[in-house]
Amino acid sequence: MGFVCPACATKDALEISLFLELPPDSRSDEITVQLLRCRSCGFPGVSVYEESRRGSLFEEAWDHQAYGLEEEEWRRLARLISVCPNRRDPNCLCSGHLELNRRDGHGAWLGLTGFRLGKPFGMVI
């Protein structure tokens, strides 16, 4: 399934090319870092999918926020994700997981600190 590219507006062209699942934090039950690339124009980006099933049994909350990235930053993040032998294992102790799984003193994930993120955009199917 592809998404609409924020750069060229091509439908179904923005794809998740690499991902890394991280352990739950003090707010979210699922955290996934996703590298994005447009098949049409080559736009590089990153998204973070977070989902929480805390609270009512019949509710869940999710956020899927994305950002443009400069090519150099995209490649740096791709190298971190690519070293992981099992990207679906949130408890992996590879260097990529350790680098991207930084937490604050309250156990909340610090996000993509250390990366120069571009303009945010929504993930549109």
Image (cartoon, helix red, strand yellow):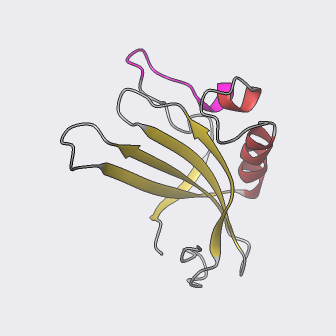
Q: Residue at x 43, y 46 (%)?
A: 50
The count of marks equals 0
Question: Is residue 101 inside the magenta stretch?
Answer: yes
User: From the viewer's perspective, is 51 left or right of 66?
Assistant: left
Q: Residue at x 31, y 42 (%)?
A: 53
Q: Residue furthest left?
A: 56
User: From the viewer's perspective, is 58 left or right of 80?
Assistant: left
In depth, the one of 43 and 53 nearer the eye is 53
Q: Residue at x 48, y 50 (%)?
A: 49
Q: Quadrant of residue 21?
A: top right
Q: Quadrant of residue 44?
A: bottom right
The image shows residue 95, relative to residue 6, as above or below, that is above
Where residue 73 appears, x then y in whole percent?
A: 72, 48
Q: Residue furthest top?
A: 105
Where residue 31 appears, x then y in whole percent?
A: 49, 41
The image shows residue 32, relative to residue 17, as above or below, that is above
**Main secondary structure found in the magenta portion:** loop
Q: Residue at x 59, y 85 (%)?
A: 10
Which segment is the magenta one?
98-107
Q: Residue furthest bottom?
A: 10
Question: Is residue 61 inside the magenta stretch?
Answer: no
In depth, the one of 106 and 30 nearer the eye is 30
